[in-house]
Amino acid sequence: MAPLPIPDILFVIASVALITSAVLVVTIRNPVRSVLSLVLCFLFTTILWLLLQAEFLSLVLIFVYIGAVMTLFMFVVMMMHVDKRMLSEKFVSYLPLGVGLLVVFVGLIVYALHHHNFTKAAYVMPHFPANYHNTESLGAVLYTHYVLAFEMASVILLVALLAAISLVFQGRQSGKSQCVDKQIQAKKKDRLVVIDMKSEAP
Amino acid sequence: MLDQCFALLWIIGKIICVLVPVIVCVALLTLLERKVIGAMQVRVGPNRNGIAGSLQPICDVLKLLAKELIIPSKASRYLFIIAPVLALAPALAAWAVIPFTNDWVIANVNAGILVVFAMTSLGIYGIIIAGWSSNSKYAFLGALRSVAQVVSYEIAMGFTFVGVLLAAGSMNLREIVLHQSGGIWHWYFLPLFPLFVVYWISAVAETNRAPFDIAEGESEIVAGFHVEYSGIMFGIFFLAEYANMILVSALAALLFMGGWLSPFAGIPYLDHWFSWVPSVLWLVLKMSFFIFLYFWMRATFPRYRYDQIMQLGWKCLIPVALVWIVLVAVAVQMGWIFH
Amino acid sequence: MHMLTEYFSIFLLVIVGLIMGVAPMLLSRKLGPSRPNPEKLSPYECGFNAFEDARMPFNVRYYLVAILFIIFDLETAFLFPWAVSLRRIHWFGFVSMMLFLAILVVGFIYEWKRGALEWE
């Protein structure tokens, strides 16, 4: 018997599951479940990227997107109280805009698919030599050839950091926290005064 | 197709060969922990079932299995059931890339350390979902605290990994160990000592163990995120926690203590005398040391306060790790160490 | 192709891990009793009924920690390939990463001085 084309089977399963969970993200009413289906989306994307042998990026997708970004989404969704009635009202009022965006998006995809380099021949499974190190090859160009983009990423991260702190953090509330270095530095003479006074009759 | 079936069976065989010892280890650890802490506090620990309490783990499992599974009426049913599974699966999956000897590993991937990092970062979903779906205040607060803590220490842990990668120049755990061969003075815990300390502290915090077990601080928020779980569902959280403990111990041994390499390599007579010891035994011994360290820390240190935990992670461990990474990188570039 | 088989075994282990989580629960459903009553199923709250919804708004600090975590996690993601390929990219790669770190350390210092790392 011919060997089963397991990568192809996995590709089909993962893409169908990816599309299904992507549809679930927008159709599920409960926001927490919606975020969880987004997590599923990322997991199936990981499988697709692994099939392309993009080892580093697919693992980064797990620990940055699922591990960090989705955690933030969970926090946000858990924090706000979503009124379900309001959601359905907004759904109707935003419908024309959504349909418009959909048309533009589908148009873009059709254009891209018609583009001459999107042929089946250009999209075969990549084959790499056995000693190919995905991460190392990535590192060899990222910090030298693409150094400008790399430094720009750090500036973007810096802006995100500053923005997050100034938006979210309103400064220290009058806390009761102890200040250890002040405690240690306190001297006896700052706290205690010994006064000489005569004893008084009651 | 027949070949593929054999390959599949071979992989499943390897998985069983790794998972069964891990689970047996967890069972033994539950007993050992109570015995060790008992001894440290001048008590006997469990001693009723079997010889010196040796059947205690089996009794515990049977008891947990025979208990009722309670799903609180206000809980989100499916998420509540799924949460322990989500805590366990990543804790076990990370074992795929852990090499036990030179050629005994389930999946010898190039980015092994990255797989472990990705899997540990998935572990927080079990906590978040358990806390949220329980619909109980204690569980919710416990989950929040736990997630914020795990997430903070994960960064420090990632930085220590970077230090090891700088030294080894590879992400493959097997190659990282092989780079440390040639005697105990080649092990990374010496040149990377600050990172080793940072790694161990963040590993303890990451697994929510004492003295960083604020998430399940019995005296204030009862049991943290799994307060509503009963019977075997609690047992699965327990299994996940212990599997994670063994995992980070194994990782500590692989990254900093030379993995399965003999500590006597390169020493004239000792090397020869201990050459009969199978290499996997060295790894097990090193892991046992780290696991013992867990129990020792639990018996010794009082619990940290939450603000102190967060300050330690962000203001001490992260800066220390970052500075040491830069120093190691300079040393590597100058060609002083790790050729 | 070799890489895919290795990752396939990790994939299998994830599935085995999921089964290992589900199987004991199914077993326990068979073995354990099931006698629910309203008191038993009520959420735990020190002996009296819950006052309000447990899913309450919480301190914004947790949200801030999550954002900071994303930023530092991305930083680690950039550090990993750098550490692996440092011997190949020489001083140029080294300096570019130092610049990257320096820019982010500015943010870290700001965050520290602003008191965003203090918990009370």
Image (cartoon, coloured by chain):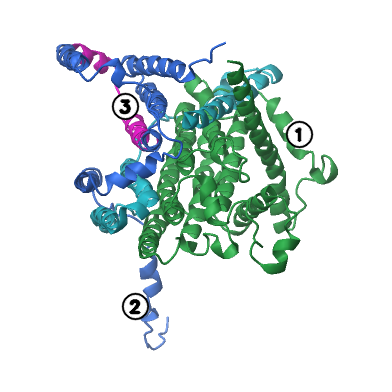
Chain colours: A blue, B green, C cyan
> Reading the chain from its start, which is encountered first: label 3 or label 2?
3
Q: Which residues are magenta?
A: A65-92
Please tell me whether mark 1 sits on a helix, a strand or a loop: helix
In the image shown, does A81 or B243 lie closer to the viewer?
Answer: B243
Please provide percent x and percent y for residue A56.
Answer: 38, 38
Please provide percent x and percent y for residue A94.
Answer: 17, 15
Badge 2: chain ID: A
Please provide percent x and percent y for residue B150.
Answer: 45, 44
Badge 1: chain ID: B
Q: Which residue is mark 1?
A: B59
3 vs 2, front mark: 3
Horizontal side, residue A133 vs residue B229: left or right: left
Badge 3: chain ID: A
Please tell me whether mark 3 sits on a helix, a strand or a loop: loop
Categorize mark 1 by other alpha carbons within 10 Å: few (<14), some (14-19), many (20+): few
Q: How far separated are the C-alphas under marks 2 and 1?
A: 61 Å
Tags 3 and 1 both on a single chain: no
**Mark linked to residue A81:** 3
Work out which quarter of the rendered image holds the C terminus of chain A and state it: bottom left
Q: How far separated are the C-alphas under marks 3 and 2?
A: 50 Å
**Mark linked to residue A190:** 2
Please tell me whether mark 2 sits on a helix, a strand or a loop: helix
Residue A84 counted in the magenta span: yes
Categorize mark 3 by other alpha carbons within 10 Å: few (<14), some (14-19), many (20+): few
Q: Please, what is the three-letter code of the amino acid marked with disc 3?
A: His
In the image shown, does C54 or A123 lie closer to the viewer?
Answer: A123
